[in-house]
Amino acid sequence: MDDQFQSVRRGGRYIVGLRFQRVGKIYHFDASNVLDLKPGDYAVVETSRGYQLGQMIYVIDESNQGVNEGLKHVLRRATAQDLVIKQGWEQKEADAVLNCQKKIGELGFRDVKIVAAEFSFDGKRLYFSYSCEEGEKVDLKPIRRAMQRVYPQTHIELHLIGPRDVAKIMGGMGACGLETRCCSAFLPDFNPISIKMAKEQGISLTPTEITGMCGRLRCCLEYEHKQYSEARKYLPKRGKRVGTPLGEGKVIEILALSSSVVVEVDSGGKHEFSAQEIITLGDQDQNKKRPENMSENQSVKIKFTNKKGKTRGNGHRS
């Protein structure tokens, strides 16, 4: 904290990250006027959704970050009374969800489901998050007017959210068996997930194996994807012809994390070889990744060193 004070004295800013939900996105604010704000403290700020109460998560070193110049200021540090007010609004949010669901039933909107409600800190705005059948366009003006009559002093807004956001808000057990879904436990954002990620990791493409409780591809497919992608750069693709200490053969399986492949050798049998024990045939780009002790003009016969330190000369280039 002393470093932050020195930075402000030199004309810098005290930039902090605030979170408004338990596992939500972190937004940056200028807290130069509230220098006693520490991680874990709550602060009152003004946002596009009105006044909000957020928890400070971290401090940003402005010298190392491209911090936006148009950041809003923290209004003040939250008091004990502010926290009590926030709890009061949270209790009313559950009632708001029930009231809205009731109105939806009365109006006949069967495909619209209210997932959550959120009051702004000053109580002047009420936001409803809802989901509906994918691809359907629904005019929700009747619902908004009905809720406006229930809460006449509050501005009502309804926001459509996707299935992943619904799963995050609802919580529950993950498809893998974890007691709490990753999105509800620690994921602040949803990154794009593709079927390619599963393929590169050799994961079964059976829908039940790669689909989460939200009905979308599991977020965990991204966790180790980078490591697999980096490891596969130095290994031949499935189906490639390679030279091995036991002769030529075809790659039938890639073991990326162990940096090895399984080769079906022409002479018979399937064997596992490390990246240093094989060379791709007929592919100059791959041959550039040959061991350092192998020259470009080396003879056709190639010597390989197995794991026991013995050399063999059964591999040949085509």
Image (tube, rainbow, N blue to C red):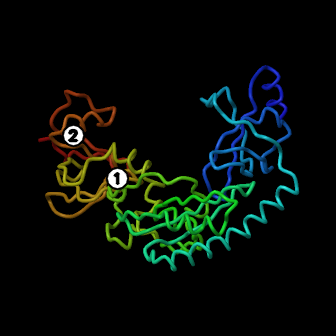
Q: Nearer the viewer, mark 1 or mark 2?
A: 1
Q: Quadrant of the C terminus?
A: top left
149, above or below 267, in the image: below
Q: Residue furthest right?
A: 80
* Residue 265 image-quadrant placement: bottom left
Q: Measuring 83% from the left and 55% from the top, which residue is drawn there?
A: 82
**Residue 140 vs residue 282, the one in the foreground:** 140
Quadrant location of the N terminus?
Answer: top right
Tell me residue 3's x, y (percent).
81, 30
Q: Name the element at disc 2.
A: strand
Helix, strand or loop at label 1? It is strand
Q: Is 143 left, or right, of 292 in this rendering? A: right
Q: Nearer the viewer, residue 90 or 243?
A: 90
Separation (CA) of disc 1 from disc 2: 19 Å
Residue ID for mark 1: 260
For disc 2, the marked residue is 302
Q: Is residue 25 above or below residue 99?
A: above
Going from N to C along the chain, the mark reached first, 1 or 2, is 1
- Horizontal arrangement in the rendering, residue 222 relative to residue 69 (left or right): left
